Amino acid sequence: MAGFKTVYICSSCEYTSPKWMGKCPKCGSWNTFVEDVQETSASSSAPKRTSVIHSGDSRAQEFSRLESPQYIRSATGLSELDRVLGGGLVSGSAVLISGEPGIGKSTLLLQICDTLGASYKVLYVSGEESSGQLKLRAERLRVSGENLYILTETNIENILSEAKKIKPDVIIADSVQTMYSDAISSSPGSISNVKEVAMAFIGKAKTEGISVILVGHVNKEGGIAGPKVLEHMVDAVLSFEGDKRQSYRIIRANKNRFGSTNEIGVFEMTDIGLRQVENPSEMLLADRPTDVSGNCAVCTMEGTRPIVAEIQALVTPTAFPAPRRTSNGIDYNRTCLILAVLEKRLGLKFSSSDVYLNVIGGLQIDEPASDLGIAMALISSLTDKKIPDTLIAIGEIGLAGECRGVSNIEQRVREAARLGFKEALLPLHNAQSCPDVRGIKIYPVKNIYDILKYLKNDTKKGEF
Ligand code: TYD
Ligand code: MG
Protein backbone atom coordinates (compact mmCIF):
# COMPACT_ATOMS: atom_id res chain seq x y z
CA MET A 1 0.00 0.00 0.00
CA ALA A 2 1.25 3.45 -0.82
CA GLY A 3 2.29 5.63 2.10
CA PHE A 4 4.39 8.72 2.65
CA LYS A 5 7.56 9.33 4.57
CA THR A 6 9.58 12.41 5.34
CA VAL A 7 13.14 12.38 4.08
CA TYR A 8 15.91 14.95 3.94
CA ILE A 9 17.69 15.52 0.65
CA CYS A 10 21.00 17.32 0.09
CA SER A 11 20.25 20.11 -2.40
CA SER A 12 23.78 19.91 -3.70
CA CYS A 13 24.24 16.20 -4.47
CA GLU A 14 20.82 14.66 -3.78
CA TYR A 15 22.06 12.39 -0.98
CA THR A 16 18.96 11.21 0.90
CA SER A 17 18.82 10.68 4.62
CA PRO A 18 15.95 9.82 7.00
CA LYS A 19 17.28 12.42 9.46
CA TRP A 20 18.33 16.04 9.06
CA MET A 21 22.08 16.54 9.05
CA GLY A 22 24.22 19.66 9.20
CA LYS A 23 26.88 18.31 6.87
CA CYS A 24 26.33 16.06 3.89
CA PRO A 25 28.41 12.87 4.28
CA LYS A 26 28.58 12.47 0.47
CA CYS A 27 29.60 15.88 -0.86
CA GLY A 28 30.67 17.58 2.37
CA SER A 29 28.41 20.66 1.93
CA TRP A 30 27.00 22.34 5.02
CA ASN A 31 23.33 23.23 5.61
CA THR A 32 22.13 21.80 2.31
CA PHE A 33 19.55 19.31 3.64
CA VAL A 34 15.93 20.17 2.88
CA GLU A 35 12.80 18.33 3.91
CA ASP A 36 10.92 16.36 1.28
CA VAL A 37 8.06 13.86 1.19
CA GLN A 38 8.42 10.59 -0.70
CA GLU A 39 5.98 7.83 -1.53
CA THR A 40 6.83 4.51 0.03
CA SER A 41 4.95 2.17 -2.37
CA ALA A 42 6.96 -0.48 -4.18
CA SER A 43 6.18 1.02 -7.58
CA SER A 44 7.43 4.49 -6.66
CA SER A 45 10.71 3.21 -5.27
CA ALA A 46 11.75 1.98 -8.70
CA PRO A 47 13.80 4.72 -10.40
CA LYS A 48 12.07 6.48 -13.26
CA ARG A 49 13.84 5.90 -16.51
CA THR A 50 13.30 8.98 -18.55
CA SER A 51 15.53 10.15 -21.31
CA VAL A 52 15.58 13.70 -22.50
CA ILE A 53 17.75 12.99 -25.56
CA HIS A 54 15.43 10.56 -27.35
CA SER A 55 17.82 9.52 -30.07
CA GLY A 56 15.51 6.59 -30.81
CA ASP A 57 18.46 4.46 -31.86
CA SER A 58 20.44 2.48 -29.34
CA ARG A 59 23.11 1.30 -31.76
CA ALA A 60 26.50 2.98 -31.76
CA GLN A 61 27.23 5.00 -34.87
CA GLU A 62 30.49 5.73 -36.61
CA PHE A 63 31.52 9.23 -35.63
CA SER A 64 32.76 10.27 -39.08
CA ARG A 65 29.37 9.43 -40.57
CA LEU A 66 27.38 11.49 -38.11
CA GLU A 67 25.73 14.56 -39.58
CA SER A 68 26.33 17.80 -37.75
CA PRO A 69 23.04 19.27 -36.63
CA GLN A 70 22.01 22.70 -37.84
CA TYR A 71 21.08 24.76 -34.82
CA ILE A 72 18.51 27.43 -35.50
CA ARG A 73 19.34 30.49 -33.47
CA SER A 74 16.83 33.25 -32.98
CA ALA A 75 17.71 36.80 -32.00
CA THR A 76 15.99 37.83 -28.79
CA GLY A 77 16.14 41.55 -29.56
CA LEU A 78 18.71 42.09 -26.82
CA SER A 79 22.12 41.60 -28.36
CA GLU A 80 23.73 41.53 -24.91
CA LEU A 81 21.65 38.44 -24.08
CA ASP A 82 22.21 36.89 -27.52
CA ARG A 83 25.97 37.09 -27.06
CA VAL A 84 25.80 35.33 -23.67
CA LEU A 85 23.61 32.63 -25.24
CA GLY A 86 26.28 32.12 -27.91
CA GLY A 87 24.50 33.96 -30.73
CA GLY A 88 20.80 33.73 -29.96
CA LEU A 89 18.25 31.35 -28.51
CA VAL A 90 18.69 27.85 -29.96
CA SER A 91 15.49 26.03 -30.86
CA GLY A 92 14.99 22.85 -28.88
CA SER A 93 17.25 24.05 -26.08
CA ALA A 94 16.53 24.42 -22.39
CA VAL A 95 17.98 27.49 -20.69
CA LEU A 96 17.91 28.16 -16.98
CA ILE A 97 18.06 31.79 -15.84
CA SER A 98 18.83 32.20 -12.18
CA GLY A 99 19.02 35.23 -9.98
CA GLU A 100 17.90 36.74 -6.72
CA PRO A 101 14.26 37.76 -6.41
CA GLY A 102 13.73 41.28 -7.72
CA ILE A 103 16.87 41.39 -9.85
CA GLY A 104 14.87 41.63 -13.10
CA LYS A 105 14.43 38.12 -14.54
CA SER A 106 10.74 38.52 -15.34
CA THR A 107 11.41 41.96 -16.82
CA LEU A 108 14.14 40.60 -19.08
CA LEU A 109 12.02 37.70 -20.30
CA LEU A 110 8.95 39.81 -20.94
CA GLN A 111 11.10 42.21 -22.95
CA ILE A 112 12.44 39.49 -25.24
CA CYS A 113 8.88 38.33 -25.93
CA ASP A 114 8.47 41.36 -28.18
CA THR A 115 11.17 40.37 -30.68
CA LEU A 116 10.55 36.63 -30.39
CA GLY A 117 6.83 37.27 -30.94
CA ALA A 118 7.56 38.78 -34.33
CA SER A 119 8.50 35.35 -35.70
CA TYR A 120 7.45 32.83 -33.06
CA LYS A 121 4.56 31.90 -30.84
CA VAL A 122 5.56 32.45 -27.22
CA LEU A 123 3.86 30.93 -24.17
CA TYR A 124 4.71 32.76 -20.95
CA VAL A 125 3.75 30.65 -17.95
CA SER A 126 3.71 32.62 -14.74
CA GLY A 127 3.34 31.04 -11.35
CA GLU A 128 4.12 34.26 -9.54
CA GLU A 129 2.15 37.09 -11.10
CA SER A 130 -1.44 37.45 -12.26
CA SER A 131 -2.20 38.08 -15.91
CA GLY A 132 -3.31 41.63 -14.98
CA GLN A 133 0.07 42.35 -13.37
CA LEU A 134 1.84 40.99 -16.43
CA LYS A 135 -0.33 43.07 -18.74
CA LEU A 136 0.49 46.25 -16.82
CA ARG A 137 4.18 45.45 -16.81
CA ALA A 138 4.19 44.62 -20.52
CA GLU A 139 2.53 47.96 -21.27
CA ARG A 140 5.17 49.79 -19.27
CA LEU A 141 7.90 47.87 -21.10
CA ARG A 142 6.18 48.68 -24.41
CA VAL A 143 5.85 45.02 -25.32
CA SER A 144 3.22 44.77 -28.02
CA GLY A 145 2.27 41.22 -27.04
CA GLU A 146 1.88 39.97 -30.59
CA ASN A 147 1.95 36.15 -30.64
CA LEU A 148 2.36 36.17 -26.86
CA TYR A 149 0.18 33.90 -24.73
CA ILE A 150 0.04 34.28 -20.96
CA LEU A 151 -0.84 31.34 -18.74
CA THR A 152 -1.07 31.76 -14.99
CA GLU A 153 -0.87 28.17 -13.84
CA THR A 154 1.39 26.15 -11.58
CA ASN A 155 0.35 22.57 -12.31
CA ILE A 156 2.73 21.08 -14.85
CA GLU A 157 0.16 18.64 -16.26
CA ASN A 158 -2.23 21.54 -16.97
CA ILE A 159 0.59 23.61 -18.43
CA LEU A 160 1.61 20.83 -20.81
CA SER A 161 -1.95 20.17 -21.95
CA GLU A 162 -2.43 23.91 -22.63
CA ALA A 163 0.89 23.94 -24.50
CA LYS A 164 -0.37 21.07 -26.63
CA LYS A 165 -3.30 23.23 -27.76
CA ILE A 166 -1.36 26.46 -28.31
CA LYS A 167 1.68 24.78 -29.93
CA PRO A 168 4.21 27.46 -28.96
CA ASP A 169 7.76 27.72 -30.33
CA VAL A 170 9.08 29.18 -27.09
CA ILE A 171 7.94 28.45 -23.53
CA ILE A 172 8.98 30.65 -20.61
CA ALA A 173 8.41 29.14 -17.15
CA ASP A 174 8.56 31.78 -14.42
CA SER A 175 9.55 30.18 -12.05
CA VAL A 176 10.19 26.44 -11.69
CA GLN A 177 10.03 26.74 -7.91
CA THR A 178 6.36 27.73 -8.01
CA MET A 179 5.29 24.79 -10.19
CA TYR A 180 4.37 21.28 -9.14
CA SER A 181 3.41 17.92 -10.55
CA ASP A 182 0.48 15.73 -9.48
CA ALA A 183 2.86 12.78 -9.40
CA ILE A 184 4.84 14.28 -6.54
CA SER A 185 3.31 14.59 -3.12
CA SER A 186 5.67 17.16 -1.62
CA SER A 187 5.06 20.91 -1.80
CA PRO A 188 6.01 23.13 -4.80
CA GLY A 189 9.64 24.21 -4.61
CA SER A 190 10.77 20.93 -3.05
CA ILE A 191 13.63 19.15 -4.73
CA SER A 192 11.55 16.35 -6.22
CA ASN A 193 8.96 18.79 -7.58
CA VAL A 194 11.50 21.16 -9.10
CA LYS A 195 13.24 18.21 -10.74
CA GLU A 196 10.01 16.70 -12.06
CA VAL A 197 8.78 20.03 -13.48
CA ALA A 198 12.13 20.76 -15.10
CA MET A 199 12.27 17.24 -16.59
CA ALA A 200 8.82 17.70 -18.10
CA PHE A 201 9.79 21.01 -19.72
CA ILE A 202 13.15 19.72 -20.94
CA GLY A 203 11.50 16.61 -22.37
CA LYS A 204 9.12 18.88 -24.29
CA ALA A 205 12.02 20.98 -25.57
CA LYS A 206 13.98 17.99 -26.82
CA THR A 207 11.11 16.07 -28.39
CA GLU A 208 9.26 18.95 -30.04
CA GLY A 209 12.09 21.39 -30.76
CA ILE A 210 10.60 24.05 -28.51
CA SER A 211 12.95 26.49 -26.79
CA VAL A 212 12.31 26.44 -23.08
CA ILE A 213 13.48 29.14 -20.70
CA LEU A 214 13.22 28.24 -17.02
CA VAL A 215 13.50 30.82 -14.28
CA GLY A 216 15.12 29.66 -11.04
CA HIS A 217 15.49 31.60 -7.82
CA VAL A 218 18.73 31.46 -5.94
CA ASN A 219 18.88 30.76 -2.24
CA LYS A 220 20.68 32.78 0.41
CA GLU A 221 24.02 31.15 -0.34
CA GLY A 222 23.74 32.08 -4.02
CA GLY A 223 23.08 28.54 -5.30
CA ILE A 224 20.08 27.72 -7.44
CA ALA A 225 17.42 26.51 -5.02
CA GLY A 226 16.66 22.91 -5.81
CA PRO A 227 18.98 20.13 -6.82
CA LYS A 228 22.22 20.67 -8.61
CA VAL A 229 20.90 18.15 -11.10
CA LEU A 230 18.84 20.95 -12.65
CA GLU A 231 22.09 22.49 -13.84
CA HIS A 232 23.18 19.19 -15.40
CA MET A 233 19.89 18.75 -17.22
CA VAL A 234 19.63 22.08 -19.03
CA ASP A 235 21.75 23.22 -21.97
CA ALA A 236 22.67 26.58 -20.56
CA VAL A 237 22.69 28.14 -17.12
CA LEU A 238 22.69 31.93 -17.09
CA SER A 239 22.96 33.93 -13.93
CA PHE A 240 21.58 37.39 -13.59
CA GLU A 241 23.59 39.35 -11.07
CA GLY A 242 23.91 42.84 -9.78
CA ASP A 243 23.65 44.99 -6.76
CA LYS A 244 20.00 45.81 -6.23
CA ARG A 245 20.97 49.20 -4.85
CA GLN A 246 22.65 50.02 -8.15
CA SER A 247 20.90 50.00 -11.47
CA TYR A 248 23.45 47.86 -13.33
CA ARG A 249 22.82 44.19 -14.01
CA ILE A 250 25.21 41.63 -15.47
CA ILE A 251 24.16 38.39 -17.10
CA ARG A 252 26.75 35.65 -17.47
CA ALA A 253 26.75 32.04 -18.63
CA ASN A 254 27.88 29.49 -16.05
CA LYS A 255 27.34 26.69 -18.53
CA ASN A 256 26.53 26.78 -22.23
CA ARG A 257 26.39 23.81 -24.57
CA PHE A 258 25.97 26.11 -27.57
CA GLY A 259 28.61 28.74 -26.93
CA SER A 260 31.33 30.12 -24.72
CA THR A 261 30.87 30.76 -21.02
CA ASN A 262 33.16 33.75 -21.00
CA GLU A 263 30.78 36.35 -22.33
CA ILE A 264 28.85 38.77 -20.17
CA GLY A 265 25.92 41.02 -21.02
CA VAL A 266 25.46 44.33 -19.25
CA PHE A 267 22.11 46.02 -18.64
CA GLU A 268 20.81 49.01 -16.76
CA MET A 269 17.44 48.90 -15.01
CA THR A 270 15.43 51.98 -15.96
CA ASP A 271 11.80 52.95 -15.39
CA ILE A 272 10.90 51.41 -18.73
CA GLY A 273 12.74 48.15 -18.21
CA LEU A 274 16.23 46.92 -18.92
CA ARG A 275 18.39 48.96 -21.25
CA GLN A 276 21.42 47.40 -22.88
CA VAL A 277 24.79 48.86 -22.05
CA GLU A 278 26.90 48.35 -25.14
CA ASN A 279 29.83 50.25 -23.72
CA PRO A 280 30.38 48.90 -20.21
CA SER A 281 33.80 50.56 -19.83
CA GLU A 282 32.27 54.02 -20.17
CA MET A 283 29.64 53.08 -17.61
CA LEU A 284 32.24 51.74 -15.16
CA LEU A 285 34.50 54.77 -15.53
CA ALA A 286 31.75 57.37 -15.21
CA ASP A 287 32.16 59.55 -12.09
CA ARG A 288 35.55 58.07 -11.28
CA PRO A 289 37.28 60.06 -8.58
CA THR A 290 40.31 62.00 -9.74
CA ASP A 291 43.30 63.30 -7.87
CA VAL A 292 43.17 60.75 -5.04
CA SER A 293 45.61 58.03 -4.15
CA GLY A 294 44.67 54.34 -4.32
CA ASN A 295 42.92 54.31 -7.70
CA CYS A 296 44.14 52.48 -10.76
CA ALA A 297 42.45 51.54 -14.05
CA VAL A 298 42.74 47.97 -15.35
CA CYS A 299 41.52 46.21 -18.47
CA THR A 300 39.94 42.79 -18.17
CA MET A 301 38.69 40.55 -20.98
CA GLU A 302 35.13 39.32 -20.62
CA GLY A 303 34.97 36.79 -23.41
CA THR A 304 35.82 38.64 -26.59
CA ARG A 305 35.26 42.07 -25.12
CA PRO A 306 37.84 44.20 -23.30
CA ILE A 307 36.36 46.05 -20.33
CA VAL A 308 38.16 48.85 -18.54
CA ALA A 309 37.37 49.09 -14.84
CA GLU A 310 38.66 51.05 -11.90
CA ILE A 311 40.23 49.42 -8.85
CA GLN A 312 40.09 51.31 -5.57
CA ALA A 313 42.31 50.48 -2.63
CA LEU A 314 42.27 51.91 0.85
CA VAL A 315 45.14 51.03 3.18
CA THR A 316 44.79 52.35 6.72
CA PRO A 317 46.65 51.62 9.99
CA THR A 318 44.91 48.80 11.79
CA ALA A 319 43.40 48.92 15.24
CA PHE A 320 43.04 45.12 15.40
CA PRO A 321 45.55 42.41 16.28
CA ALA A 322 44.76 40.66 12.98
CA PRO A 323 44.45 43.30 10.23
CA ARG A 324 41.29 43.36 8.12
CA ARG A 325 41.28 42.32 4.46
CA THR A 326 38.14 43.13 2.51
CA SER A 327 37.88 42.70 -1.22
CA ASN A 328 34.78 43.49 -3.19
CA GLY A 329 34.72 42.28 -6.80
CA ILE A 330 38.20 40.71 -6.59
CA ASP A 331 38.97 37.19 -5.43
CA TYR A 332 39.99 37.32 -1.76
CA ASN A 333 42.80 34.78 -2.17
CA ARG A 334 44.23 36.72 -5.12
CA THR A 335 44.25 39.86 -2.97
CA CYS A 336 46.15 38.04 -0.23
CA LEU A 337 48.62 36.68 -2.76
CA ILE A 338 49.37 40.13 -4.22
CA LEU A 339 49.75 41.59 -0.72
CA ALA A 340 52.18 38.80 0.20
CA VAL A 341 54.26 39.41 -2.94
CA LEU A 342 54.40 43.17 -2.28
CA GLU A 343 55.36 42.62 1.33
CA LYS A 344 58.06 40.04 0.60
CA ARG A 345 59.56 41.45 -2.58
CA LEU A 346 59.20 45.18 -2.01
CA GLY A 347 59.37 45.18 1.79
CA LEU A 348 56.14 47.20 2.03
CA LYS A 349 54.48 46.85 5.41
CA PHE A 350 50.86 45.85 4.79
CA SER A 351 50.84 43.57 7.82
CA SER A 352 50.14 46.49 10.14
CA SER A 353 47.36 47.92 7.95
CA ASP A 354 43.76 47.15 7.13
CA VAL A 355 43.24 46.74 3.39
CA TYR A 356 39.98 47.43 1.57
CA LEU A 357 39.72 46.73 -2.17
CA ASN A 358 36.79 47.50 -4.42
CA VAL A 359 35.93 47.42 -8.11
CA ILE A 360 33.77 50.40 -9.04
CA GLY A 361 30.42 49.59 -10.64
CA GLY A 362 29.90 46.15 -9.09
CA LEU A 363 31.96 44.25 -11.67
CA GLN A 364 33.49 40.94 -10.63
CA ILE A 365 37.09 40.70 -11.85
CA ASP A 366 38.67 37.26 -11.89
CA GLU A 367 41.35 37.68 -14.52
CA PRO A 368 44.99 37.75 -13.37
CA ALA A 369 45.65 40.52 -15.94
CA SER A 370 44.36 42.97 -13.35
CA ASP A 371 47.06 42.00 -10.80
CA LEU A 372 49.34 44.85 -11.79
CA GLY A 373 46.56 47.41 -11.39
CA ILE A 374 45.63 45.97 -8.00
CA ALA A 375 49.27 46.14 -6.88
CA MET A 376 49.56 49.74 -8.13
CA ALA A 377 46.39 50.78 -6.30
CA LEU A 378 47.62 49.15 -3.08
CA ILE A 379 51.05 50.78 -3.24
CA SER A 380 49.48 54.11 -4.17
CA SER A 381 47.20 54.04 -1.14
CA LEU A 382 49.93 52.87 1.23
CA THR A 383 52.43 55.51 0.12
CA ASP A 384 49.79 58.15 -0.62
CA LYS A 385 51.23 58.74 -4.10
CA LYS A 386 48.73 59.34 -6.83
CA ILE A 387 48.51 57.42 -10.05
CA PRO A 388 47.77 59.66 -13.06
CA ASP A 389 44.12 59.41 -14.22
CA THR A 390 45.37 58.75 -17.74
CA LEU A 391 47.33 55.63 -16.75
CA ILE A 392 46.20 52.04 -17.14
CA ALA A 393 48.06 48.97 -15.80
CA ILE A 394 47.77 45.54 -17.39
CA GLY A 395 49.68 42.41 -16.35
CA GLU A 396 49.79 39.34 -14.17
CA ILE A 397 52.08 39.14 -11.14
CA GLY A 398 53.97 35.95 -10.31
CA LEU A 399 55.12 34.84 -6.88
CA ALA A 400 58.69 35.97 -7.58
CA GLY A 401 57.37 39.46 -8.29
CA GLU A 402 57.76 39.09 -12.05
CA CYS A 403 55.22 40.67 -14.38
CA ARG A 404 53.85 38.08 -16.79
CA GLY A 405 52.39 38.62 -20.22
CA VAL A 406 48.66 38.43 -20.85
CA SER A 407 46.57 37.58 -23.91
CA ASN A 408 44.72 39.97 -26.28
CA ILE A 409 47.07 42.83 -25.47
CA GLU A 410 46.35 44.87 -28.60
CA GLN A 411 42.61 44.76 -28.03
CA ARG A 412 43.06 45.89 -24.43
CA VAL A 413 45.37 48.77 -25.33
CA ARG A 414 43.04 49.92 -28.12
CA GLU A 415 40.08 49.98 -25.75
CA ALA A 416 42.15 52.01 -23.26
CA ALA A 417 43.18 54.44 -26.02
CA ARG A 418 39.56 54.79 -27.14
CA LEU A 419 38.60 55.80 -23.63
CA GLY A 420 41.28 58.50 -23.51
CA PHE A 421 44.06 56.79 -21.56
CA LYS A 422 47.52 58.12 -22.43
CA GLU A 423 49.96 55.74 -20.68
CA ALA A 424 49.87 51.97 -20.38
CA LEU A 425 52.07 49.88 -18.11
CA LEU A 426 52.44 46.50 -19.83
CA PRO A 427 54.47 43.36 -19.11
CA LEU A 428 57.81 43.56 -20.91
CA HIS A 429 56.91 40.68 -23.20
CA ASN A 430 53.64 42.33 -24.24
CA ALA A 431 55.20 45.78 -24.56
CA GLN A 432 57.64 44.41 -27.14
CA SER A 433 54.99 42.69 -29.21
CA CYS A 434 52.20 45.26 -28.96
CA PRO A 435 51.90 47.40 -32.11
CA ASP A 436 51.83 51.17 -31.79
CA VAL A 437 48.43 52.44 -30.82
CA ARG A 438 47.76 56.09 -31.50
CA GLY A 439 47.50 58.31 -28.46
CA ILE A 440 48.91 55.88 -25.92
CA LYS A 441 52.49 55.54 -24.70
CA ILE A 442 53.62 52.12 -23.58
CA TYR A 443 55.89 51.58 -20.56
CA PRO A 444 57.31 48.07 -20.10
CA VAL A 445 57.24 46.45 -16.65
CA LYS A 446 59.58 43.53 -16.06
CA ASN A 447 58.82 43.04 -12.38
CA ILE A 448 57.13 44.86 -9.54
CA TYR A 449 60.33 46.80 -8.71
CA ASP A 450 59.62 48.68 -11.92
CA ILE A 451 56.24 49.95 -10.79
CA LEU A 452 57.82 51.38 -7.67
CA LYS A 453 60.22 53.23 -9.94
CA TYR A 454 57.33 54.65 -11.98
CA LEU A 455 55.42 55.73 -8.91
CA LYS A 456 58.45 57.39 -7.35
CA ASN A 457 58.94 59.64 -10.33
CA ASP A 458 55.27 60.46 -10.36
CA THR A 459 55.87 63.98 -9.06
CA LYS A 460 56.70 65.32 -12.55
CA LYS A 461 53.27 65.96 -13.99
CA GLY A 462 52.16 63.40 -16.56
CA GLU A 463 55.71 62.13 -17.09
CA PHE A 464 57.50 59.27 -15.39
P1 TYD B 1 11.38 41.58 -11.74
O1 TYD B 1 11.60 41.40 -13.19
O2 TYD B 1 10.01 41.36 -11.22
O3 TYD B 1 12.40 40.69 -10.90
P2 TYD B 1 12.46 39.10 -10.74
O4 TYD B 1 11.57 38.48 -11.74
O5 TYD B 1 13.91 38.75 -10.96
O6 TYD B 1 12.06 38.79 -9.35
O7 TYD B 1 11.82 43.10 -11.46
C1 TYD B 1 12.37 43.48 -10.28
C2 TYD B 1 12.55 44.95 -10.03
O8 TYD B 1 12.79 45.73 -11.16
C3 TYD B 1 11.35 45.52 -9.35
O9 TYD B 1 11.68 45.73 -8.01
C4 TYD B 1 11.08 46.80 -10.01
C5 TYD B 1 12.18 46.99 -10.99
N1 TYD B 1 11.72 47.46 -12.30
C6 TYD B 1 12.16 48.68 -12.76
O10 TYD B 1 12.93 49.39 -12.10
N2 TYD B 1 11.75 49.11 -13.99
C7 TYD B 1 10.89 48.38 -14.76
O11 TYD B 1 10.53 48.81 -15.87
C8 TYD B 1 10.45 47.12 -14.26
C9 TYD B 1 9.50 46.28 -15.05
C10 TYD B 1 10.89 46.70 -13.03
MG1 MG C 1 9.80 37.44 -11.37
Image: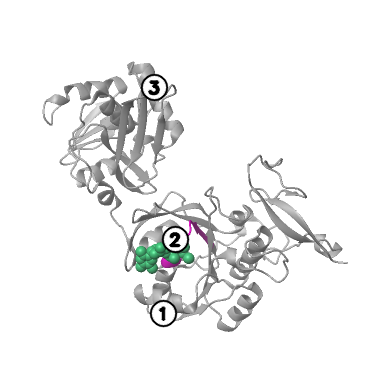
Instruction: Please state the horizontal and vertical placement of residue 22, each as a whole percent of the image.
Output: 67, 42
Which residue of the protein is positioned furthest toward the bottom in this rendering?
165
Nearest the eye: 62 or 327: 327
Q: Amino acid at mark 1?
A: Gly
Q: Which residue is mark 1?
A: 145
Which residue of the protein is positioned furthest toward the front in this rendering?
319
* Residue ID at (63%, 45%): 31
* Residue ID at (32%, 61%): 276
Graded by Cα atoms within 10 Å as few (under 14), some (14 to 19) or many (20 or more), the crowding at tag 3 reads: many
Q: Earlier in the sequence, mark 2 or mark 1?
A: 2
Which residue of the protein is positioned furthest toward the right in this rendering?
1
Q: In the image, which is nearer the foreground, mark 2 or mark 1? A: 2
Numbered badge on residue 102: 2
Is residue 192 among what the camera can see?
yes
Q: Which residue is mark 3?
A: 341
Is residue 105 among what the camera can see?
no
In this view, 123 is above or below 412: below
Q: Amino acid at mark 2?
A: Gly
Q: Earlier in the sequence, mark 2 or mark 3?
A: 2
Q: Is residue 153 left or right of residue 280?
A: right
How far apart in space, not on screen, are marks 3 and 1 (Cα)?
57 Å
Q: Is residue 450 left or right of residue 121?
A: left
What segment carries the magenta color? 95-108
